[in-house]
Image (tube, rainbow, N blue to C red):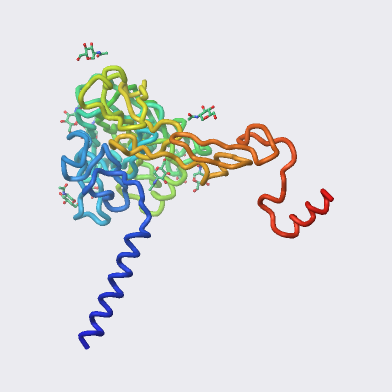
Amino acid sequence: MLEKILKMIRKMLVIWVMMLLWWPTTSSNVKPGCQEKCGDVSVPFPFGIDNLNCAKDESFLLTCNRSKTPATLMFGENIATLNISVEEGIVVASIDSAMRCYNESGLRQETVFDQSITLGNGPFRFSDTRNKLTAFGCDTLALMTDRNEGFWSACGSFCSGNQSDSMDITGDSCSGIGCCQTPLPKSLNSLNITLVSITNYTQVPKFNPCDYAFLADESFNISEFQQSLDLEPDKVMNSKIAIEWVAKEENCEAGKNSSDYACGRDARCDYSKNVRGYRCLCKKGFRGNPYLPEGCEDVNECEEPENYPCEGTCKNTLGNYTCSCPLGMRGDGKVGCQGYRILTIAAGNILLQSFVQLIN
Ligand SMILES: *[C@@H]1O[C@H](CO)[C@@H](O)[C@H](O)[C@H]1NC(C)=O
Ligand SMILES: *[C@@H]1O[C@H](CO)[C@@H](O)[C@H](O)[C@H]1NC(C)=O
Ligand SMILES: *[C@@H]1O[C@H](CO)[C@@H](O)[C@H](O)[C@H]1NC(C)=O
Ligand SMILES: *[C@@H]1O[C@H](CO)[C@@H](O)[C@H](O)[C@H]1NC(C)=O
Ligand SMILES: *[C@@H]1O[C@H](CO)[C@@H](O)[C@H](O)[C@H]1NC(C)=O
Ligand SMILES: *[C@@H]1O[C@H](CO)[C@@H](O)[C@H](O)[C@H]1NC(C)=O
Ligand SMILES: *[C@@H]1O[C@H](CO)[C@@H](O)[C@H](O)[C@H]1NC(C)=O
Ligand SMILES: *[C@@H]1O[C@H](CO)[C@@H](O)[C@H](O)[C@H]1NC(C)=O
Ligand SMILES: *[C@@H]1O[C@H](CO)[C@@H](O)[C@H](O)[C@H]1NC(C)=O
């Protein structure tokens, strides 16, 4: 009996050791000992979850709220993070829309919600190229301001004709009829959105008792938005926004000079004009997370002939690859080899014989 158990343990040990040996060495996207994911969302360094040691500094520290289902990665208090891109320097997030619903007697106070979001003091800005202030409704003025009232902007959305008719939104556009959009100013990191009625809620359309205003990135699709409202008229809606980020708000020269330079080995510094500051990218021929000290790893070009053509003998080098033409041919193997290949080298017996016959 004991022997049987021992045998089993030995077997399991062998399997375990084999697994250790064969386990693919995947390059990590986080600091050692840190969590890679919150729910479905990957959290690459310089971002970190819950533990300050896992993030570059406190502005990149996000919280994972595991009481929500699914677990939700929170950026500040009321911004849910959906995707973090290191290469593009973008965080895609979701926020609730500002809204107001009304009935025949006017505004329903319990449905009034004004949105206020802030990206904090870190190197984060609402993308002015990807986001637009968007409003949806028939008698709506959407007002947008930053927290310190540094600027004001608005867009108005109205419906024409008989207010009992169904809303007629032409095509996919938000051109002021039932829907409007207006661009954001540059370098915004906080935003208050509120809705007002032009007619003091006296022109209540029967088909659409709620108005909405929100920031939305280019993925916003008005027909999908309307379809979702048709199914559930009083719904709390949310939208996707794009947040741009850099490692630090200084230029590359100052960054390289400072003790907390963010870019690791084999990474290069890239100055971003949109959010004034620098970000890191792996050098050509390397791939991985440029913010980790040794995150950029050499690409083995020979394993990816579809991206890195080679007609001859491929050899990987650090940051590049060489390709020499087969024996008897000349030229640059990456572009194409000229001349006649001596078939016998790689071919089998039959070809060898025919080659020998050819010579004879
Ligand atoms: C997590 O989410 C729950 C449910 O939405 C909420 O009640 C709670 O306050 C959140 N916790 C934190 C730390 O934000
Ligand atoms: C996150 O963004 C990247 C690049 O933009 C994309 O390839 C990936 O599919 C996205 N992931 C999710 C969960 O949306
Ligand atoms: C309109 O909504 C208010 C607040 O929800 C409610 O008190 C009132 O009865 C509603 N009026 C009608 C005509 O439904
Ligand atoms: C924006 O909203 C926040 C939170 O509701 C509020 O404290 C602040 O005063 C508002 N700022 C402006 C300019 O309306
Ligand atoms: C709007 O349409 C309704 C029924 O479709 C009709 O009773 C009403 O008179 C119309 N109002 C105007 C201003 O045309
Ligand atoms: C808007 O309507 C409400 C009642 O529906 C009224 O009390 C209020 O004075 C009106 N406001 C304006 C600016 O007309
Ligand atoms: C918006 O969504 C509808 C329905 O899903 C689709 O047919 C349409 O092509 C989309 N429009 C754009 C601009 O993506
Ligand atoms: C780099 O640091 C040195 C010494 O700390 C300083 O003299 C120099 O001005 C710095 N250069 C830049 C571009 O900040
Ligand atoms: C790789 O080597 C070729 C010459 O063989 C050179 O033209 C190319 O710039 C190199 N690429 C990198 C990323 O160094």
**Is 70 placed above or below 187 here?**
below
The residue drawn where x is 32% and y is 52% is 40
Question: How far across and how far down the image is residue 7, in percent?
Answer: 27, 80
The residue drawn where x is 43% and y is 35% is 318
Q: Quadrant of the N terminus?
A: bottom left
Q: Nearer the viewer, residue 289 or 66?
A: 289
In the figure, is residue 179 to the left or right of 33? right
Q: Nearer the viewer, residue 87 or 354?
A: 354
Residue 124 appearing in the image: no
Quadrant location, ligand no. 4: top left
Residue furthest bottom in the image? 1
| Residue 92 occupies quadrant | top left
| Residue 338 occupies quadrant | top right
Q: Nearer the viewer, residue 335 or 248?
A: 335
Q: Nearer the viewer, residue 65 or 250?
A: 250
In the figure, is residue 109 to the left or right of 183? left
Question: How far across and how far down the image is residue 159, in percent?
Answer: 43, 35
Residue 155 appearing in the image: yes
